[in-house]
């Protein structure tokens, strides 16, 4: 029985190597240096994020700045990121007896555009969306705080999505 298991493991290992061999030259790390020796991390640090209006915009901008250059090092910007947000609240569950919605969903849509500096050539653009639900209660402050927490969760999701997409675009650019 043990010889059967070892034979099976050897066959599985050989199959994995055989299937992965054609892809050996195609896969490169996203955040490491690419074939040209340019690191995506250094490129991300050179992204300057424009101001984004409103409270959710403030949260998204802070998350993006932290995500692009969490080291705090001063880098001469080579790219400018513009983000336009739209936010809406949906109340999917409505109690007809009390005329009160028992939950809400904060939906944030982000249109972003990455341009080179100083020539302002658009090299990446896209749309990101995030949804965060929360329970609603009769206490007003509880609802305000829950909605703000949903906005903060959405800001993190939007910023992570934009950062990952831009990292992919910058890695493929070189």
Image (spheres, rainbow, N blue to C red):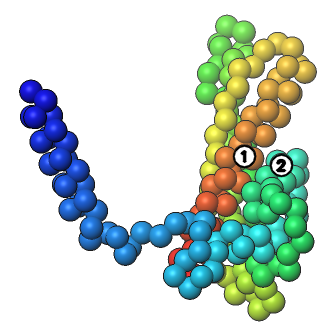
Mark 1, secondary structure of its residue:
helix
Instruction: Determine the residue positioned at 83% across, 78% down.
Output: 77
**Where does residue 75 sit, x and y in percent of width and height?**
85, 75
- Foreground pick, 82 / 17: 17
Q: Residue furthest front?
A: 3
**What is the spatial separation of the Cα atoms under label 1 and label 2, in whole angstroms?**
8 Å
Instruction: Determine the residue positioned at 56% across, 85% down.
Output: 36
Quarter of the figure that contains the N terminus = top left
The circle on residue 168 is none
- Foreground pick, 135 / 88: 135
**Where does residue 142 sit, x and y in percent of width and height?**
85, 19
Image quadrant of residue 88?
top right
Q: Is residue 88 left or right of residue 18?
A: right
Mark 1 residue crowding within 10 angstroms, few (<14) / some (14–19) / many (20+): some
Instruction: Determine the residue positioned at 70% across, 26% down.
Output: 134
Mark 2, secondary structure of its residue:
helix
Q: Is residue 126 left or right of residue 48?
A: left
Residue 56 visible in the displayed image? yes
Image quadrant of residue 123?
bottom right
- Report the number of numbered marks: 2
Disc 1 marks which residue?
A: 156
Mark 2 residue crowding within 10 angstroms, few (<14) / some (14–19) / many (20+): many
Q: Residue furthest bottom?
A: 119
Question: Relative to 91, is 170 above or below?
Answer: below
Query: Which mark sits nearer the N-terminus, 1 or 2?
Result: 2
**Where does residue 135 sit, x and y in percent of width and height?**
71, 20
Q: Residue furthest top?
A: 97
Disc 2 marks which residue?
A: 59
Image quadrant of residue 31?
bottom right
Residue 101 visible in the displayed image? no
State yes or no: discs 1 and 2 in contact (Cβ < 8 Å): yes
Quarter of the figure that contains the C terminus = bottom right
């Amino acid at each position: 029985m043990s010889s059967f298991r070892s034979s099976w493991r050897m066959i599985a290992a050989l199959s994995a190597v055989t299937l992965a061999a054609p892809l050996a030259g195609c896969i490169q790390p996203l955040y490491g240096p690419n074939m040209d020796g340019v690191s995506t991390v250094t490129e991300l640090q050179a992204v300057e994020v424009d101001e984004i209006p409103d409270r959710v915009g403030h949260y998204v901008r802070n998350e993006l700045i932290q995500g692009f250059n969490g080291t705090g090092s001063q880098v001469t910007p080579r790219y400018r990121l513009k983000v336009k947000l739209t936010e809406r609240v949906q109340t999917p569950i409505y109690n007809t007896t009390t005329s009160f919605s028992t939950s809400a969903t904060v939906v944030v849509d982000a249109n972003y555009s990455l341009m080179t500096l100083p020539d302002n050539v658009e090299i990446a653009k896209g749309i990101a969306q995030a949804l965060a639900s929360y329970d609603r209660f009769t206490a007003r402050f509880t609802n305000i705080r829950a909605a703000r927490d949903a906005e903060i969760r959405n800001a993190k999701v939007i910023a992570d999505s934009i950062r990952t997409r831009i990292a992919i675009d910058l890695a493929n650019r070189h």
